[in-house]
Image (cartoon, helix red, strand yellow):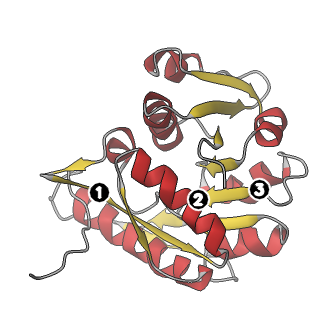
Amino acid sequence: MSQNPRIAIVGAGNVGGNLGIHLARSGFSVRFGVREGSDAKEVIEKSGGKAEQSSIPEAAKWADVIFLAVPANAAVEATRSMGDISGKVLVDCNNPLKWDDGPVHTPPPEGSLAAALAKAFPKVRVVKGFSTFGAEFHLEPKLGNTSIDVQLAGDDAQAKELVSSIATRAGFTPVDVGPLRNAAHLESLAILWIHLAMRAGQGREIGFKLLKRG
């Protein structure tokens, strides 16, 4: 397992942009994959010039781990645009939802977006993660006197271990929540976070934390 995996970020919005900035600042080799006619100049500048950009297929080919942070309805097509990424680790950071006086989970027939990605790309090592908190924590994982939990679901133990090591090195607290079928529960947890933050008046500086007594 690589001690310094190369990381591609596909999606340079609030989530992908902040995560890429933070991972680059944490010492990882980061490349943003951008569509033709777009650029990641702003996030690269915020990373202190420690990240790069290229086309989506080039970034995906170069990377060991690909973080996918795009609108959920574009996730499958965005992954298809990467070209052949067989054997690579794909981290699904997205949540399918609609807004109906609050967030409503709208999973695909497979039960979760991660499961849909795994079905569409069976040779890709899909891990669900970095999906249950707001973009502020992707940039700064500190939560009180500890750090935000990153729940990880997936069927490939080595892939989860690799993503867990990235999370730990970047200052997050990884929590293995089991097989990929549990990605559906993480998407529901994300819906709950959005409701609490944006409808229940808790604000965005909140996060879920697994704690042990004693």
Q: Position of residue 191 (x, y in %)?
A: 39, 69
| Viewer-side residue, 6 vs 55 | 6
Position of 151 with respect to 88 (left or right) is left
Q: Amino acid at mark 1?
A: Ile
Position of 116 with respect to 51 (left or right) is right
* Residue positioned 18% across, 52% down in the render: 203
Q: Residue furthest right?
A: 84
| Viewer-side residue, 108 vs 25 | 25
Mark 2 or mark 3, earlier in chain: 3
Mark 1 or mark 2, earlier in chain: 1
Residue bearing mark 1: 148
Q: Quadrant of the C terminus?
A: bottom left
Distance from the alpha carbon under mark 2 to that under mark 3 = 11 Å
Q: Quadrant of the N terminus?
A: bottom right
Q: Position of residue 21 (x, y in %)?
A: 47, 30
Residue bearing mark 2: 162
Residue bearing mark 3: 88
Mark 1 or mark 3, earlier in chain: 3
Q: Is residue 168 at all visible to an observer of this figure?
A: yes
Q: Is residue 93 at all visible to an observer of this figure?
A: no
Position of 59 with respect to 27 (left or right) is right
